[in-house]
Image (cartoon, grey):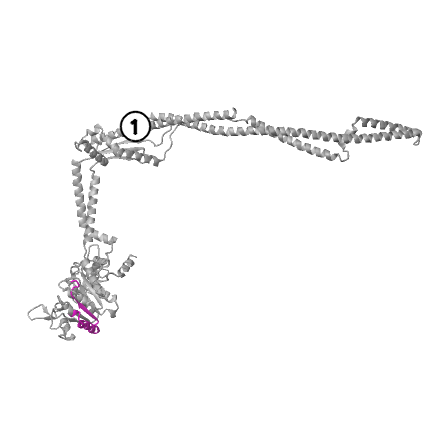
Amino acid sequence: MTEQKQMATNRMPRRPGARPAEPAVILTPKEIFGIVRRHIWLIVVMTILGLMISGISWFLVRRYAPKYTARTLIRVLPPVQRDPMAIGERVVAKDIQYGYRLSMAALVSQQGTLDKLIRRDKVQATKWFRKFGKVKEESITEAIKDLNKNMRASAQRESNFVVISMRCGNKIEAALIVNEMVDLFLNLRGTAKREEVTDKLTKLGSQRLRVQRDLDSAERSLEDVRGRWGLTDIGGENRFQHTITLRLNDLELEQNELLLRIREAQAFIDTLSRRAAEPINEQVENQIERDPIMVLLAQQLVLRQAGLASKLTRFGENHRVVRQDQELINEIREKRRLRRIEIADQTRISNLENAKDELIILTRRFEELTKMKDETQARKRDLDIARVQFAQRETIRDEREEMLNSIKSQIEKLKIVHDDPETPKVKFVAKAPIPLAMSSPRWQVYFPAGIMLGFMLGIGLAFLIELLNDLVRTPRDVNRHLHIPLLGFVPHADEDEYIENIDLCHVVSKAPYSIISESYRQFRTNLKLSNPAETLKVILVSSSVAGDGKTSVVSNLAAAFVADSKTVLLIDANFRRPALHAVFQIEKTDGDETPSQPEFGLSNILMGQCAQHDAIKQSGIEGLDMICSGQLPSNPTELLGSSKMEELVKQQRDNYDYVIIDSAPALLASDAKILAGFVDKTVLVFNATTTRRGVAQRTIRELKEVNAEIAGCVLFAVKTIKGGYFQEQFKSYQEYHELRLVNTS
């Protein structure tokens, strides 16, 4: 993902002349390990130096400024207020207790407590206090600052103690100051807590008077309710119903019963009225039979019927006596009929009248009951209102009584708490003893700290040296800072034992088995594979400044192409400081070992003084031809930018497989920028021992500003880095090459 972001950043258009932003430096673990290996002696020296400094410091501090620490404990009770009337204690969560101990420790260390401690006579009489000066207020200020540094109050998590400690140069005074602080703090906490309890008692006393007044007012309001409604039997426990309620209940029951009787009477009257028009029923018949007259007539009828029977037997039916008895019997029967009708009518009328009279009586009684009920209900409503008012005032009275009792109970408890020795919630444990050994300096701290600081300083210096080194030394530097392909690297001459007494410009041809020669062949291969063959015919080789190894790279690259059965034309376009004619010893003057320029060269072609074939010379290597620079012109830039130079490149492109042009350094002359427009690709040479990142970045930027096609770069004179790049590769190549030579022999 990071590489994709970097490529996207490289593709973004930049303003001409704009400098690309430097990416963040990210070191891999392997690079970090390599930096440590390269500077291991620096780290070791700094670690030893740190150990020595810490040892000297420990000795000097121990002799001239020792410190003693006196400690003691105070016990902190649970923060809840214990009920003196209850048995046992409330369980408090450990976190709450620990938080309370922390607050006690903070109270010990607060400035007000420290100020009171310093103003004690015993503390001011110590040497520790007198060392802060003779001006009292200023010395108190300085003493408070010293206490803030050296006095500590820390709460223990797993126990109920707060540790108070003091560190100073005199062990006796350290114990004295700690004990004075404990005594002061216990007195302050006791006074503060008792003052707090006293304030609570005062407030509760005022509250008790106010509640008592409210209670008296509530009692008076209850009496007012009784007097207003004339009810003296309301209130109390109210276990039984009031007499008015009972009376109302009785009236309602009686009224309901009476109403039932009225309804029955009305139904009975309706029944009697209906029976008056109906035949005589059995009930009336029974009353008729019990009538004395009816009984007498019945007896007479029986006697007459008995006499008639005897007379019928003696006289017969037509006898006068028999007929007279028969008439008397009929007469008696008629009387019984008439009497029966009379008695039935009288009985019905009497029953109906009696029922109506009874209904009237019941109705009047019902009206009386209704009136009595209304009066009782009115009294019941008054009773209910009185009860509601009484209950409201009674509730207020009960609340005030309960509140008053609670206040009295709290007052009694607070009086007990005020005199309780555990009220301050802190208890004295023991005085601080005089320390037996000094607490500072401790070699267990000084020596490891010195070793660690020295080691960290060595590590820091090692990384600082690496980060301040801005040379382009490794492929990672090229990838991270230059953002162009790395086509190859050429080891430093000191890294290859096979090139002793060999000119670096002829390593490929004279030391083909050396690692440097192999590096040039890898460079050639990478260059060929970096672009299609048809777009890589004319190659410009340049560098940032003189001395970067450009000429050596050009010579060996041409030899590497020739070794690959390619034809190469090497053109020396460096009119500032030409060197190829000397490298290949094109011509020599008599008596002088330094080769001179041939009669015709590139400058002669560009000025029209000779044809192209006249300037092309044999290099001494089959397949490699050369065009030397010729006589140095006064206007090299103009000549290189002329149409003849472009024509030369076009013609020779078809005659050779590769045309390699050696130009002047890009930052020292504009020749390379001119030639970059005629070639297919430009290759830059950076010296790993001298080329700095800024110089390389500037070279690339200036060439890109003229639209030069940069194929990549070559790192020249690369040295192995201990624990880093190239070391393993160079070693592996040498071992492999030695093994091959042994097998060949």
Which residue position holds label 1? 191
Image height of 447 relative to 698, above or below = above
> Quick one: quadrant of the N terminus?
bottom left
Q: Is residue 229 left or right of residue 207?
A: right
Residue 316 in sight in this render: yes
**Where on the picture, by quarter, is residue 483?**
bottom left
Q: Is residue 124 magenta?
A: no
- Nearer-the-camera pick, 60 or 190: 190
- Nearer-the-camera pick, 238 or 695: 238
Q: Is residue 660 magenta?
A: yes
Residue 712 in sight in this render: no
**Where on the picture, by quarter, is residue 471?**
bottom left
Q: Position of residue 235 (x, y in %)?
A: 50, 26
Q: Position of residue 549 (x, y in %)?
A: 16, 63
Residue lying at the far left of the rendered structure: 591
Image height of 491 relative to 239, above or below = below
Disc 1 is placed on an element classified as helix
> Quick one: quadrant of the C terminus?
bottom left
**Where on the picture, by quarter, is residue 302?**
top right
The residue at 25%/67% (across/down) is: 531
Q: Position of residue 578 (x, y in %)?
A: 13, 67
Q: Which span of residues is magenta-colored? A: 639-667
The three-letter code of the residue at mark 1 reads Thr
Q: Position of residue 10 (x, y in %)?
A: 26, 60
- Nearer-the-camera pick, 364 or 670: 364
